[in-house]
């Protein structure tokens, strides 16, 4: 009887040992899982936080994914990001950083290197010389039926114009097709029965990248403007 009891105890200890070993192996495998980038998002005060497939030098972006902690390097088109700056924030699911002004615009790749491995993500850096901007408005007191002229750079391809309304809303303005809309001027017709407020103007642009042979949608925002009726 004692021998049987001893054998059962020995078997139980052996099984427990195997279970503990299996748990440790699973834990180590999980801890050593390589990084993965799932998406890239804008992360800037002057624009909404939204997913993107491209950015410009100087803009701040956030990589979303998994197992991004224990970060060793972030490389954008061959350009190393300085991880010791105040503009780099890292967690297991996010890495936020500012693109250098001299980042390479060729290569279309972001590489993340952690203690456990690396991952590549296809991402476009467009030249700063092609970045759209909004610089001025023909008026800030807006009258229904009149045309608002928005001035800036690289505004060709304008498809939509949005202006801020009271209580956090916004309204879409029809683009005035009777006037010439080009790289520097977009003309929008002020709609009826709306109450304007302080906020940002948004222009949605349809662009073509001849180098990559792709068409893409881009949004450009003004600074905070005190629009009123």
Image: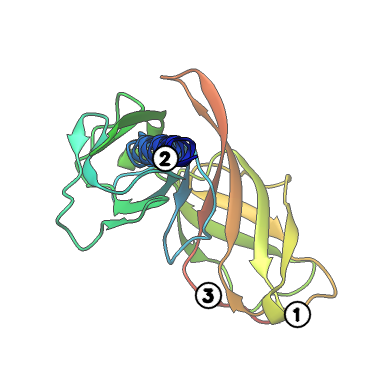
* Quadrant assignment, res 116: top left
Say which residue appears at 28% left-offset and 47% top-offset.
99
Q: Secondary structure at mark 1?
A: loop
Q: Secondary structure at mark 2?
A: helix
x, y (%) of residue 220? Answer: 51, 52
* Quadrant assignment, res 56: top left
The mark nearer the N terminus, 1 or 3, is 1
The mark nearer the N terminus, 3 or 2, is 2
x, y (%) of residue 46? Answer: 44, 64
Q: Along the line of sight, which residue is nearer the eye, 104 or 130?
A: 104
Q: From the image, tell me which residue sits under label 3.
A: 225
- Marks 1/3: CA–CA distance: 14 Å
Task: Mark yes or no: residue 180 visible.
Answer: yes
- The answer to whether the residues at label 1 and label 3 have Cβ atoms under 8 Å apart is no
On the picture, is 125 further left or further right than 77? right
Say which residue appears at 56% left-offset and 68% top-offset.
200
Q: Along the line of sight, which residue is nearer the eye, 68 or 42?
A: 68
Q: Secondary structure at mark 3?
A: strand
Task: Mark yes or no: residue 126 visible.
Answer: no
The mark nearer the N terminus, 2 or 1, is 2
- Marks 3/2: CA–CA distance: 83 Å
Q: From the image, tell me which residue sits under label 1.
A: 195
The mark lying in front, picked from 2 and 1, is 2
- Marks 2/1: CA–CA distance: 86 Å
Q: From the image, tell me which residue sits under label 2.
A: 6
């Amino acid at each position: 009887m004692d021998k049987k009891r001893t054998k059962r105890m020995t078997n139980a200890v052996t099984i427990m040992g195997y279970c503990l070993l299996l748990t440790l192996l699973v834990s180590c495998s999980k801890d050593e899982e390589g990084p993965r980038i799932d998406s890239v998002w804008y992360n800037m005060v002057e624009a909404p936080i939204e997913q993107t497939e491209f950015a410009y030098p100087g803009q701040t972006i956030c990589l979303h994914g998994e197992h991004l902690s224990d970060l060793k390097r972030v490389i954008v088109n061959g350009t190393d990001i300085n991880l010791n700056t105040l503009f780099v924030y890292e967690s297991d699911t996010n890495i936020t950083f500012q693109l250098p002004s001299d980042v390479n615009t060729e290569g279309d790749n972001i590489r993340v290197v952690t203690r456990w491995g690396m991952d590549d993500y296809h991402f476009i850096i467009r030249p700063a010389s092609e970045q759209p901007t909004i610089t001025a408005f023909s008026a800030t007191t807006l009258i229904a039926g009149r045309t608002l002229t928005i001035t800036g750079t690289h505004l060709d391809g304008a498809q939509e114009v949005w202006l801020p309304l009271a209580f956090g809303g916004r309204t879409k303005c029809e683009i005035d097709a009777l006037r010439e809309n080009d790289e520097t001027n977009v003309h929008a017709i002020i709609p009826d029965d709306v109450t304007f407020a302080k906020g940002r103007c948004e222009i949605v642009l349809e662009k073509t990248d001849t180098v990559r042979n792709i068409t893409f949608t881009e949004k450009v925002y003004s600074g905070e403007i005190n629009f009123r009726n």
